[in-house]
Amino acid sequence: MRLAGKVAIVTGGAGGIGRGIVRAFVEEGAQVLFVDIDPAAGEALEAELGGAGKFLRVDISDESSAETIVAAAVEQFGKLDILVNNAHASRQAPLLETTQEMLDLSFGTGFYPTFRLMKAAHAQLAENQGSVINFASGAGIDGSPTQASYAAAKEAIRAISRVAANEWAPENINVNIISPLALTEGVQAYIEANPGIEEALLAKTPMHRFGDPQADIGRVAVFLASKDASYITGQTLMVDGGTVKLR
């Protein structure tokens, strides 16, 4: 029970990697407020988790949502120790075909909500010597074709995470980043829509498999949120089977 007594917020928590993290956190004793725009998936997961998980239907692209989310977590569970900014939406297109609308979608669901939630959660995190876990992508680190808007927002998230890691270290808040490769509903749909892409992706992955949202990504999130990682901050952990190796 490495997270016993801890309270977490997880955005995009009703499906995919977010759901895997929520389940992993609850398994380790945390209470979790998870945020999503899918009411059916959110309510189903809340019922599965019992009192340890509370679903909040919120559109994080709304500028006022950050304060609402933090307030809901504190009202429900009494405090906040862990913030996980997982939610992100984007559309693919070559760089020359990337539009302002695509950039607005990616930054509006990824970078700006991450930035606003970090600010809104800071007081609680400082009081409880908490942790922030943000999400990057190999698409940004390696510059994957057709991923301009997504890559730009993900690298912007990495940048502010490093700034926060430096500024908030004196308050014993650690801020880290996970860059994952996992078989989620979205990745499965992408594979089905692009014949041959699964083999191409796995050929670049030394472990030759996709990660599991709970067993692989969720367990690393548990570690980063636990006391075992209290001396780690400002780092990007590549949880991708060896696909990208940072230097």
Image (spheres, grey):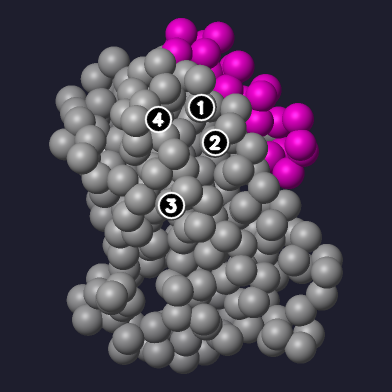
Mark 1 lies on residue: 122
Instruction: Kindly tell me whether residue 131 is visible in this rendering.
Output: no
Disc 1 from disc 4: Cα separation = 10 Å
Disc 2 to disc 1, how far (Cα)? 6 Å
Q: Nearer the viewer, mark 4 or mark 2?
A: 2
Question: Which of label 1 and label 4 is nearer to you?
Answer: 1
Q: Position of residue 201 (x, y in %)?
A: 39, 83
> Few, some or many C-alpha atoms within 10 Å of disc 3 (few <14, some 14-19, many ≥20)?
some
Identified at 65% across, 58% down, the residue is 89
Mark 3 → mark 2, Cα distance in angstroms: 12 Å
Task: Kindly identify the amino acid type of the residue bearing the numbered disc 3.
Answer: Arg
In the picture shown, does residue 141 fall above or below 134? below
Residue tagged by mark 3? 162
Q: Position of residue 125 (x, y in %)?
A: 43, 24
Instruction: Identify whether 142 is placed above or below 125.
Output: below
SS at badge 4: strand
For marks 1 and 4 on the same chain, the one whose residue lies earlier in the sequence:
4
Q: Nearer the viewer, mark 3 or mark 2?
A: 3
Residue depicted at 35% across the width and 50% down the height: 234
User: What residue would you read off at disc 2?
Assistant: 118
Question: Which quadrant of the rendered structure holds the C terminus?
Answer: bottom left
- Quarter of the figure with residue 70: top right
Residue 194 as seen in the image, left or right of residue 53 = right
**Alpha-carbon span between mark 4 and mark 3:** 17 Å
On the rendered structure, is 79 left or right of 171? right
Up the image or down, 7 lies above or below 236; here it is: above
